Amino acid sequence: MAVYFSNGDIEFSLGNEELIKDWISAIIFRHNKKLGKINYLFCSDKMVYDMNLRFLNHDTLTDIITFDYVNGNLISGDITISIDRVGENATLFDTSFEHELHRVIIHGVLHLLGFKDKTPDDAAIMRAKENESLQILDSMTE
């Protein structure tokens, strides 16, 4: 199957799509799962907010919404990312836009793999998995 990237209400180019696709596949494989179909939609805060309210009844801004279509070991889903929020969070966390974007991209995949982040313990595990995944990406670019 495959990973797809598209834009919602903004113009955005990921730039290194093939590397990111290979990375996502590698992370899924490392968790003994198979890649199904994952669709990424890059958009504005407004679009993510509207989706959050409409589909999840959450009246908040967020950087990512993950819709899980996992079927057994086949990892599939729709992942919507606010490029506005990624940019603001990069500044807030004193990191590059690209690094924060990669963190959010893999965060959605980790949700599809079953990782949660609602409790402090779960959030700590999620952050560790994000960092581990980012190190794998770094090793793929060396």
Image (cartoon, rainbow, N blue to C red):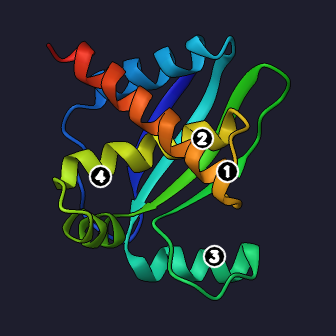
Q: Secondary structure at mark 4?
A: helix
Identify residue type, mark 4: Glu
Front tag of 3 and 2 = 2
Residue 89 is left or right of residue 23, and the answer is left
N-terminal of the two: label 3 or label 4? 3
Q: Position of residue 83 (x, y in %)?
A: 32, 64
| Residue at 30%, 68% in the rendered image | 89
What is the crowding at mark 3: few (fewer than 14 residues within 10 Å), some, or many (at least 20)? Answer: some
Describe residue 97's horizontal placement relative to residue 41 as left or right. left
Looking at this view, name the residue that lies furthest to the bottom.
59
On-image quarter of the N terminus? top right
**Residue type, label 2:** Ile
* SS at circle 1: helix
Find numbered disc 2 in the image and state the secondary structure of the residue it sits on.
helix
Mark 3 to mark 2: distance in Å?
A: 24 Å
Badge 2 vs badge 1, beta-carbon distance below 8 Å = yes
Q: Earlier in the sequence, mark 1 or mark 3?
A: 3
Amino acid type shown at disc 1: Asp
- 3 or 2: tag closer to the N-terminus: 3
In front of the other: 62 or 19: 62
Between the C-alphas of marks 2 and 4, the distance is 18 Å
The vertical placement of 55 against 141, above or below, is below
Q: Which mark is residue 121?
A: 1
- The relative height of residue 38 versus residue 9 in the rendered view (above or below) is above
Of the pair 49 and 114, the residue shown nearer to us: 114
Q: Residues within 10 Å of mark 2 (few under 14, many from 20)?
A: some
